[in-house]
Amino acid sequence: MAAKVAIQKFSFPFACAVRLSQQDETVCIQTKVSPILTEPGPVAVIGALGRDENQKSPKPPLNGLQTLGMVTQVLVCSEASQTAVFSRRGGFDKLTVESEDQRPATKRQLSSESAARTITVVKKSAVRTEVEEQRPLKPKTHPGTRGGSRVAAEGKRRRRKDLFTNFEVFQRVDSHVIRAGAELKDKCVYNVKTIVQSITQGARNELERLRAIWVWLCNNIEYDVSGYLGQSERLSSPEEVIAAGRGVCCGYSNLCIEMCREAGIDCQEVPGHSKGIGYRQGQSLKNVKSDHLWNAVLLGGQWFLLDACWGAGRVDMEHESFVKRFDDFYFLTEPEEFIDSHFPDEERWQLLDGPVSLEEFERKVFKTSAFFNMGLKLIQPHQSHIVTDNGEANVSLAFSRPATFTYEITQHQDLLHSGSSEQKDSCNSSHGLLTVSHRNMNLQLLPPAIGTYDVKVFARPESATTCLTWVCSFTVECPTPRAMEVIPENPFLSWGLQPAAETLGVAGSSQGSEVGEVKEGAFELVLKTSRPLMVLCELVHPGLDVAVAKRCLATQIQPDVLTCNVLCPVLGFYRLSVFVRDYEKTEVKFQNAANFLLHCKGKVIGPDELFPPNLGSACGPGTRTLEAGLSKFSHTTALVSTQQGKCNITFHNQRDLELHTTLSRDKDKSPTAVIPLSRHLFCTYTDSKVTVSISLPDAGLFKLGLYAKTSGPAGDFNPMCDFVLRNSCDQPGPPFPCVYSAWRKGCVLFEPRVGLLEPLSWVRFRMRVPGAHRVSVLGETRTELKMNKSRVWEGEVFTGNGQQQLKLAASEESGDMTVLMTFDVKQSEREE
């Protein structure tokens, strides 16, 4: 009866000299009376649970050696001889991680340690001897032989996510292991059994015991770089590795096996090739001795892979040092991901339904743990070595969560793991075009010369502020480079809209991430915005001076659109970078929202065709003019072209602001003129409508500045917007009259509209002057104008010989005459 109770109570894995096999769902138990025991007493387990006898497996050979799938008997000493068959639950059910508050009180009391307790016997020496004799009969379970477990029955491989949802479930275990490991180190405890008992204390199941062992290995053993380089003796035995706190891969794997044995976990050593330190990209591994060891563990009747050596950190070959960096990825890694960097000597340890050949492994693209942790997927290429086509090679990745990318292209080095695994927020290479769309990253590589190059791709989650991390690598062979101009450096990682552009308020762009072709030396970029923004643009060309580059840009800021007009004075590639901030948040810094690569390969803009200097950031009507109450502009863009040398720009001044206009151009290009540029502007105010008339003196580009007083009579004039006037007419436009402040709102000049009159001629004057009681033209003689029925003052005026200006003056009732404007008269030929 005692035997029956003991069997029912402890029908799960034991940690005694012999433990229950975790593969079997149905277990055969054979009992017989021990000649040693004369009285009913405790039960002793002296065998190991084996396969279901219904399975067709060979029986163990006479010499005691155990083969895969052998039937093993469990002999139980009892009071009477009897045979009992019972079923036990699948080991996988015991692996799920439960929280303490969800487990029944009775289960919490029955810890995995008590479950693994050895059942004592009356004569221990006799039992121990019999156990040692039976030990060689224990089978070594191999991948694919899962016994009668539920996993095998279902025919579906369990994934890591089936064991646990995320690594946070191990927070309690990990914290205990790190704390216990530090205490054991301080006490100089190097005994494997003691360490395992300490770190697995409180572990509730086999999975948590394994996790405790793996975390201890990663946090307490450093990779022995000096041993690997042959500068010191390599340590491999568990005792040496623990005492020194360092070891190479075999040190990690051997110690893992010993610790798992103490914890009652079936663990195997897996030798093979890895793409770790010492791996040379493109090398053939055929007939080359494998260089790495890792482990496989049996959980719930199924094998899983892990590598504590890679989980502990990485080796910096540049500085011949170990960089401690805990990496969860190599704990129970999925076989489909593990095979990208680990190739076992025995095919069965790939744990894949479709095994990979050594040649396929050599061709596989190397992917770091960060590649998988970020959920990246490789679109192209599907092999690590790329040969350029017409001097170009392409790499494409897909991602499910927003990410930031950059890359590094260098001359080929033999070792894959050379250089830093991190990259700062910049990319100084000009030999590629990296573009990021909504769910894809595309890298167009353009090697500058014949040769072989190493390419590393770096990435990080968009929301992260840390350095970008190495995610995958390629080698690029360039037999024939493409003849092309130098591409400007892009310190902002990628081309096109930045991944964070939408959060900055940029909703879309007229230009994608591809190269923008510049036609006729000019390019227009339009960005859609989700809210009012301020914008600054930067244009960079390897052969372009910064001061000249500023005269190649004119930006227009509207509430829902940002427009940047670009001029290209030289051939080649340009980088156009766009920076934005919220319109009203003046204290916020501008942030990079987009970078576009432009290519000018046809006509270029001449030096005299550049935009006028000192253009404001707001050209053309936009957010600022709307806020000031200026609306209904006749010209809605920043650029105004005229083929006649003259034009009118009209708009409405709804708030009756005091306005001021200026006209300017490049001083170096401006011819010496007696009449100033201000005489080529004439403003007319009627009701709320404003008309700015322009008559340009010659061909070229001019800046029209519009200013307004928006803070009361004592305030300063603030810039509203600038217009770029492009005149293609070679004939000089005449100046307007010189206007004085008395020419105010409501005054309209009909005739003459020019301010330079012919001498010795009669000129008809017509104008409207509201409130005037008297209007006269003063020259060599005085001419009084008369008001007609339309309240327009008019009359014929003789210009004279040019000795005097003509002054238009007006007065209110019983007031003094005030000069409104003056007209110049050309000198007659006789005087000349």
Image (cartoon, helix red, strand yellow):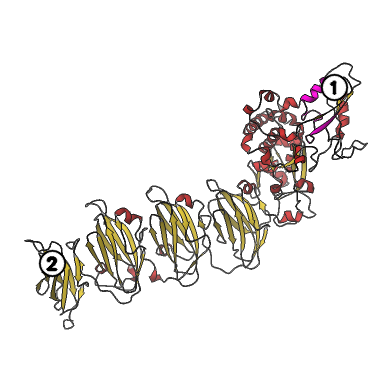
Q: Which mark is residue 20?
A: none
x then y, percent, for residue 683: 24, 64
x then y, percent, for residue 244: 71, 36
Q: Which mark is residue 124?
A: 1
Q: Which quarter of the figure is the C terminus placed in?
A: bottom left
Q: Is residue 26 magenta?
A: yes
Q: Is residue 480 above or below residue 339?
A: below
- Is there any visible trace of residue 233 in the rendered image? no
Classify mark 2: residues with Cα within 10 Å, few (<14), some (14-19) or many (20+): many
Classify mark 1: residues with Cα within 10 Å, few (<14), some (14-19) or many (20+): few
x then y, percent, for residue 584: 37, 49
Q: Nearer the viewer, residue 427 or 189?
A: 427
315 on left or right of 496: right
Q: For numbered disc 2, what is the local secondary structure?
A: strand
Q: Is residue 383 above or below residue 586?
A: below
Q: Nearer the viewer, residue 467 or 98?
A: 98
Amino acid carrying mark 2 in the image: Ala
Displayed quadrant of residue 728: bottom left
Q: Earlier in the sequence, mark 1 or mark 2?
A: 1
Q: For numbered disc 1, what is the local secondary structure?
A: helix
In this view, the residue farthest toward the right is 62
Residue at 26% x, 51% y is 711
CA distance separating discs 1 and 2: 131 Å
Please give the range of residues in magenta: 1-30
Amino acid carrying mark 1 in the image: Lys
What residue does disc 2 label? Answer: 809
Residue at 21% x, 74% y is 756
680 on left or right of 444: left
